C-alpha cells in the first residue's frame, strides 16, 4: 500500500515538472527577464554578502601578515639599536680616555721644568672641616710625603700619607692647610689658609700693612715653608675685608683649581 502511494506521488511530481517546462518554453523573453529580475533580486544580496565576507577575510589575512612583518622588522631595529648603543658607549670610553691623556699631556707641558708623575683622583673625602683626595699612585711610583700636587690650573695640595699604590693629598682648601704665598704684582708675602666661613675658598692673612691689594690680583706660592715650589698659581683675590686695625685685614682668595671637578693631577717628585 505504501509503495503504491509513493508511485502516485512520483508520477504527480513528474507531471508538474513537465507542465512547468512546457509553460516556460512557451513564455516570451519579457516574462523570462521578469523572472530573472526576481531571482536576481533575491540572489544578489546573498552573493554580495558572500563577496564582502570573502574580501574581509582576505583583507584580515593581509593585515595579520603585515603585523607579523612589522614585528620582525621591530625586532631587527631593536637589535640594531642595541648594537649602536654598545658602539656609542665604546666611543664614549675612548673619548674619556683621550681626554684624560690630553690632560696628562697638557699638565706635563705646563710644568716641563719639574719632574712629575701623572695621577688621577680615585676618591674624595669632602666635609666642612676637611678636603682630602686619594690618588692612584704611591710608594711603588716614587711618591713620598710632602710632595707637591698640582693640576693644569694651579696648586692642588700636598701628599700627607702614602701606601704602596695610593697616596692621600691634603688640598689647599682643607681647614688644616696653610700655604706661604706671594702677590704676583707687588711681591708682598702673605699666608693662605682653608676656611670654614667661605666654602671652597681661601683666606689670606698676615698681609703687610703697606701692601696694595686689588681684587683680581693673582696669588702664587712663595717658595718658603719647605713644601711648595715657588711660582705655582694659587688663585686670585676675590674680595678684601678691611678692619679698624689694618694689621688685621684679610682677603678672600678664589682658588685657581675647581676642586669639585678636578680629576687629573701631577705629583712633583723633584
Image (spheres, grey):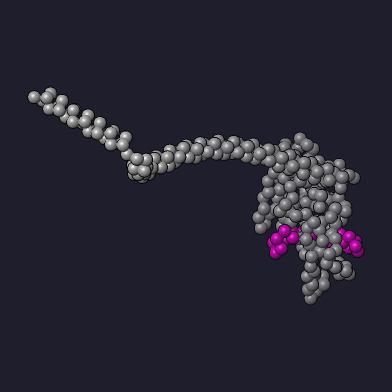
Q: Is residue 245 magenta?
A: no
Which x, y percent locates residue 67?
51, 39
Count of picture labels: 0
In the image, residue 188 lies in the stretch drawn in magenta: yes
Residue that appears at 11% across and 24% down: 4
Residue 20: x, y in percent? 26, 35
Res 64 visible: no
Image quadrant containing the C terminus: top right
Chain part drawn in magenta: 182-201
Secondary structure of the magenta portion, mostly?
Answer: loop
In the picture shown, does residue 252 fall above or below 169?
Answer: below
Q: Quadrant of the N terminus?
A: top left
Q: Is residue 73 depicted above or below 191 in this figure?
A: above
Seen from the viewer's position, the closer of residues 51 and 67 is 51
Is any part of residue 210 visible from this angle?
yes
**13 with respect to 257 (left or right):** left
- Residue 170 versus residue 93: which sits nearer the camera? 93
Q: Quadrant of residue 161?
A: top right
- For image coordinates 80% across by 69% down, the residue present is 240
Q: Is residue 220 left or right of residue 22?
A: right
- The location of residue 263, given as percent across then percent down, is 74, 47
Q: Is residue 18 left or right of residue 200?
A: left
Depth check: give the residue in front, 47 or 227. Answer: 47
Q: Residue at coordinates 81% horizontally, 41% vertically from top-left?
A: 117
Q: Is residue 206 left or right of residue 24?
A: right
The residue positioned 81% from the left and 56% from the top of the image is 234
Residue 182 position within the rendered picture, expressed as x and y whole percent measured from the top left:
86, 59
Most extreme residue toward the bottom, as rendered? Answer: 244
Amino acid at each position: 500500500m505504501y509503495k503504491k502511494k509513493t508511485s502516485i506521488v512520483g508520477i504527480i511530481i513528474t507531471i508538474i515538472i513537465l507542465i512547468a517546462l512546457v509553460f516556460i518554453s512557451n513564455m516570451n523573453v519579457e516574462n523570462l527577464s521578469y523572472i530573472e529580475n526576481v531571482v536576481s533580486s533575491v540572489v544578489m544580496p546573498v552573493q554580495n554578502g558572500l563577496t564582502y565576507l570573502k574580501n574581509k577575510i582576505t583583507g584580515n589575512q593581509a593585515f595579520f601578515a603585515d603585523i607579523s612583518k612589522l614585528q620582525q622588522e621591530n625586532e631587527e631595529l631593536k637589535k640594531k639599536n642595541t648594537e649602536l648603543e654598545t658602539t656609542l658607549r665604546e666611543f664614549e670610553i675612548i673619548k674619556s680616555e683621550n681626554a684624560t691623556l690630553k690632560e696628562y699631556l697638557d699638565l706635563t707641558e705646563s710644568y716641563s721644568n719639574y719632574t712629575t708623575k701623572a695621577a688621577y683622583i680615585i676618591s674624595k673625602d669632602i666635609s666642612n672641616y676637611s678636603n682630602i683626595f686619594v690618588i692612584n699612585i704611591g710608594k711603588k711610583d716614587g711618591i713620598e710625603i710632602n710632595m707637591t700636587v698640582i693640576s693644569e690650573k694651579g696648586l692642588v695640595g700636598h701628599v700627607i700619607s702614602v701606601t704602596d699604590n695610593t697616596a692621600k693629598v691634603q688640598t689647599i682648601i682643607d681647614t688644616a692647610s696653610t700655604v706661604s704665598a706671594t702677590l704676583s704684582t707687588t711681591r708682598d708675602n702673605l699666608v693662605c689658609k682653608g676656611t670654614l666661613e667661605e666654602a671652597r675658598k681661601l683666606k689670606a692673612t698676615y698681609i703687610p700693612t703697606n701692601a696694595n691689594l686689588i681684587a683680581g690680583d693673582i696669588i702664587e706660592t712663595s717658595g718658603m715653608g719647605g713644601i711648595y715650589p715657588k711660582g705655582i698659581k694659587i688663585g686670585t683675590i676675590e674680595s678684601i675685608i678691611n678692619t679698624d686695625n689694618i694689621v688685621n685685614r684679610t682677603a678672600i682668595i678664589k682658588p685657581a683649581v675647581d676642586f669639585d671637578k678636578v680629576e687629573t693631577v701631577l705629583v712633583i717628585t723633584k
